[in-house]
Image: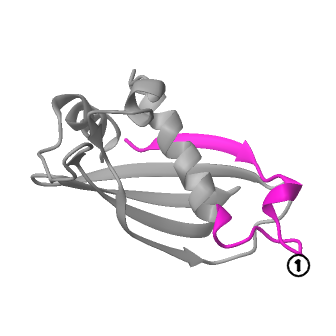
Amino acid sequence: MPFCYTRTVRFAETDAAGVVYFANVFQLCHEAYEASLAAAGIDLKEFFCQPKMAFPIIHSKADFYRPLTCGDSLEIELTPVFCPPDEYEINYHIKVGDRLAAQATTRHVCINAHQRTRQPIPEFLLNWLDQWSN
């Protein structure tokens, strides 16, 4: 079952045309990602601040179907997919009401944070993947 995250678009996230600046969609997605990690019991400070392992994004894409504007109430559905042995992808569906407004994907790789070499996904993250997968 996907993880669902809700929030409202803020004025600072919009551009001169009054719509969410395209790059801010990834910021919204990352907020949902962080919330899903926390909901799975993962300590965010330990995960992101000077970890032994890191999970950098190696690919991202987004498709937009309607403008997102200040005050829109968003529901972001996050579904992770394991790509053995050392990568995972996160698919995001951003909705306003029942309408799909945007889709995004980020692909991450697990690395040793000090040596910058690939390593298998650790058990705690496999549990997170299982919790929010379809």
**Residue located at (62% from left, 63% from top):** 25
Q: Is residue 40 left or right of residue 5?
A: left
Report the residue that reaches farthest toward the front: 114
Near mark 1 (Cα within 10 A), the count class, few <14, some 14-19 or many ≥20, is few
The amino acid type found where label 1 is placed reads: Ala
Q: Is residue 99 visible?
A: no
Q: Position of residue 104 (x, y in %)?
A: 49, 66
Q: Nearer the viewer, residue 113 or 108?
A: 113
Q: Position of residue 86 (x, y in %)?
A: 15, 52
Q: Nearer the viewer, residue 133 or 126?
A: 126
Q: Is residue 37 visible?
A: yes
Q: Is residue 17 left or right of residue 60?
A: right
Colour scheme: one colour
Q: Is residue 17 left or right of residue 113?
A: right
Q: Quadrant of residue 58?
A: bottom left
**Residue located at (61% from left, 55% from top):** 27
**Residue located at (63% from left, 69% from top):** 23
Q: Helix, strand or loop at disc 1?
A: loop
Q: Position of residue 123 (x, y in %)?
A: 17, 30
Q: Is residue 43 left or right of residue 75?
A: left
Q: Which segment is the magenta one?
A: 1-24
- Residue matched to label 1: 17
Q: Position of residue 45 (x, y in %)?
A: 47, 26
Q: Is residue 47 above or below residue 79?
A: above
Count of labels in the image: 1
Q: Is residue 134 above or below residue 39?
A: below
Quadrant containing the N terminus is top left
Q: Would you say residue 11 sits in the magenta stretch?
A: yes
